[in-house]
Image (tube, rainbow, N blue to C red):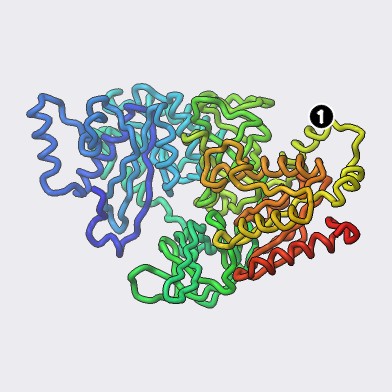
């Protein structure tokens, strides 16, 4: 059932998630809705009934949805299933989320796409711990349109008193977490009571049927009407037949952009204008809107990285920061602790992140709140502060859902997820704290930097050669070391793999880049403290990484040799070379920089 119904393109589509404790009847409810609205393939219902008879199993509407063999044998829904049905003028995309506590991470991933929710509670079992957890997670994910379905009323003889007790208890809970349900409704999903039409078995219920309640859910403002958001997934450069375009590729999350529009990339804040809309093997187009997987060329051809967000100039843009206050739901086997590095994934960005503060932790089972914890434990819901290695672009959940939700990866496992509440000012970064601790414990002798400079006839410094990935940064850095060594200088070239010191990564690019930058800065501090001219080559250096290197290398200085149009402001770019620079000319320009900054005093040459 992965194809939308015929004619769906001309009808309104609505994403609805169904959640609830295990065995409270979610799959049965969805199966009955599929059957009663005529949304099943021809003969499917009879086929399932016949299969049950052959296997001497009682028929369940849940079998229409639970397709995996191990799901039927265990009687629980393991993954998030999607199905479709029509009612009146709307096509519903139903997401059946797991209810078992061990599958809560699947439930979060399913609910994240929803515009509204049906939350099921078994009339016999009543409000369970997971019922509260699911209610809190819907609140945390920003889903405000919720109908609470009290199911299996047939098993309590359709008693109004039982229904009333559940409504009273769960209403108190939802009020405490600031969720106002649209309605409560009593149903018997297996028998179809109160689903399509009002049930004669519950005359005391005066409200509409479940389908009529669902039909009154309001459709969110379409993504196309919102401000433009384009998370950059990759950048492609073509060189054949003189084609020098740099195509910025990804998927438009919201809004629309056209050729000629001014755009800004965040967090780098680079500005450009859209020159063309690129799509493989498709007719030429001049604009692209929400939902389009597309590419753009811009002028000037600014260098941007995957993970940045392209927004339209003049519209509300995403926030940029490195300190985020969030609501976090933790699902990792090991607790989230301060001081340990994790990976934050938001939109297309992936960056190292640390837990900085735990403001409060809520036990969703009884709404007790704990303050002053130092970690976030399994199934905790925490209001906390996280700090990323460098600033990223994001939105508050109240403004944009897709760029306001995130997941946390611990090792290779998704261990947590949550929403961004606000961006906080960073009054003291992790690097600043690290440097303070380092300097307090640094052991020095009576040999001063001036004494080393006098001995070696040079000022120690850290020379960073940078530029685009395709530039010859390493070649220039190595040749500079050779030239200075030939002139008798105390110099060393630090290669990228040398600085990694055992990190298993693709040349420091990717999830270990933050650790690589930290180690590179520490190594530079050691070399320059010893009086050396240290030379390194680091492609794709951005301004935030340069700022980290400057801080880690203090009090010694950094000189930057930049190839191409890389924009850096955290340290002055001493030399800027064209991409097609001559090697000898590049080395001479770098030497001249060292002389002009008195790293190489003239009288020693």
Using the rendered image of the protein, determine whether residue 200 is visible from the camera's viewpoint: no
Tell me the crowding category of disc 1: few under 14, some 14 to 19, or many 20 or more residues within 10 angstroms, Cα based. few
Tell how many labels.
1
Taking 63 as reference, is 403 left or right?
Answer: right
Spot occupied by residue 510 in the image (x, y as percentages of width and height): 54, 47
Report the front residue among 78 and 246.
246
Tell me which residue sits at (61%, 58%) in the image: 475
Q: Label 1: which residue?
A: 441
As displayed, is residue 594 above or below residue 516? below
Q: Quadrant of the C terminus?
A: bottom right
Using the rendered image of the protein, determine whether residue 392 is visible from the camera's viewpoint: yes
What is the quadrant of residue 117 in the picture? top left
What is the quadrant of residue 184 in the picture? top left
Taking 315 as reference, is 169 left or right?
Answer: left
Spot occupied by residue 518 in the image (x, y as percentages of width and height): 67, 42
As displayed, is residue 585 above or below residue 353? below
Report the front residue among 394 and 59.
394
As displayed, is residue 30 above or below residue 240? above
Taking 337 as reference, is 409 left or right?
Answer: left
What is the quadrant of residue 581 in the picture? bottom right
Report the front residue among 190 and 243.
243
Spot occupied by residue 309 in the image (x, y as percentages of width and height): 56, 58
Report the front residue among 507 and 482.
482
Spot occupied by residue 282 in the image (x, y as percentages of width and height): 34, 71
Tell me which residue sits at (31%, 45%) in the image: 82
Tell me which residue sits at (74%, 55%) in the image: 486
Element type at mark 1: helix
């Amino acid at each position: 059932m992965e194809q939308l119904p015929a004619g769906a393109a001309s009808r309104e589509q609505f994403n609805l998630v169904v959640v609830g404790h295990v065995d409270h009847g979610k799959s049965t409810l969805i199966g009955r809705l599929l059957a009663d609205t005529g949304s099943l393939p021809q003969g499917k219902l009879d086929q399932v009934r016949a299969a049950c008879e052959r296997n001497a199993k009682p028929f369940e509407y849940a079998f229409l949805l639970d397709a995996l063999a191990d799901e039927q044998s265990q009687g629980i829904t393991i993954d998030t299933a999607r199905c479709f049905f029509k009612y009146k003028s709307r096509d519903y995309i139903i997401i059946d989320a797991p209810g078992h506590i061990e599958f809560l991470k699947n439930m979060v991933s399913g609910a994240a796409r929803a515009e509204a929710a049906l939350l099921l509670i078994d009339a016999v079992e009543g409000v369970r711990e997971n019922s509260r957890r699911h209610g809190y997670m819907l609140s945390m994910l920003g889903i405000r349109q919720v109908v609470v379905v009290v199911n299996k009323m047939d098993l309590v003889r359709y008693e109004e008193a039982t229904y009333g007790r559940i409504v009273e208890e769960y209403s108190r809970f939802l009020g405490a977490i600031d969720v106002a349900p649209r309605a409560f409704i009593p149903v018997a999903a297996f028998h179809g009571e109160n689903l399509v039409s009002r049930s004669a078995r519950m005359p005391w219920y005066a409200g509409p049927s479940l389908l009529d309640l669902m039909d009154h859910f309001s459709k969110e403002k379409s993504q196309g009407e919102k401000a433009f958001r384009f998370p950059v997934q990759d950048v492609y450069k073509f060189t054949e037949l003189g084609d020098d375009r740099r195509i910025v590729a990804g998927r438009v999350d919201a809004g629309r952009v056209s050729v000629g529009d001014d755009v800004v990339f965040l967090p780098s804040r680079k500005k450009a204008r859209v020159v063309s809309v690129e799509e493989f093997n498709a007719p030429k187009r001049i604009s692209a809107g929400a939902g389009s997987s597309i590419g753009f060329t811009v002028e000037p051809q600014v260098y941007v990285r995957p993970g940045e967000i392209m927004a339209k100039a003049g519209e509300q843009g995403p926030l940029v920061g490195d300190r985020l206050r969030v609501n976090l739901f933790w699902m990792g086997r090991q607790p989230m602790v301060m001081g340990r590095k994790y990976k934050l994934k938001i939109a297309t960005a992936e960056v190292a992140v640390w837990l900085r503060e735990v403001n409060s932790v809520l036990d969703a089972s009884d709404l007790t709140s704990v303050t002053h914890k130092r970690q976030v434990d399994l199934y905790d819901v925490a209001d906390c502060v996280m700090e990323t290695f460098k600033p990223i672009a994001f939105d508050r959940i109240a403004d944009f859902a897709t760029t306001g939700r995130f997941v946390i990866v611990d090792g290779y496992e998704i261990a947590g997820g949550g929403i961004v509440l606000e961006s906080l000012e960073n009054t003291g970064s992790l690097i600043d704290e690290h440097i303070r601790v380092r300097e307090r414990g640094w052991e020095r002798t009576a040999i001063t930097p001036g004494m080393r400079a006098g001995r070696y006839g040079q000022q120690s410094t850290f020379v960073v050669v940078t530029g685009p990935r395709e530039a010859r940064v390493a070649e220039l850095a190595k040749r500079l070391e050779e030239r200075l060594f030939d002139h008798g200088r105390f110099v060393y070239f630090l290669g990228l793999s040398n600085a990694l010191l055992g990190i298993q990564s693709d040349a420091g690019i990717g999830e270990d880049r933050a650790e690589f930058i930290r180690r590179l800065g520490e190594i530079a501090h050691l070399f320059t403290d010893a009086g050396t001219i240290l030379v390194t080559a680091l492609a794709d250096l951005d301004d935030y990484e340069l700022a980290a290197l400057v801080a880690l290398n203090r009090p010694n200085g950094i000189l930057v040799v930049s190839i191409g149009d890389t924009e850096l402001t955290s340290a002055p770019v001493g030399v800027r070379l064209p991409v097609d620079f001559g090697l000898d000319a590049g080395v001479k320009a770098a030497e001249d920089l060292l002389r002009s900054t008195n790293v190489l005093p003239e009288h020693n040459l």
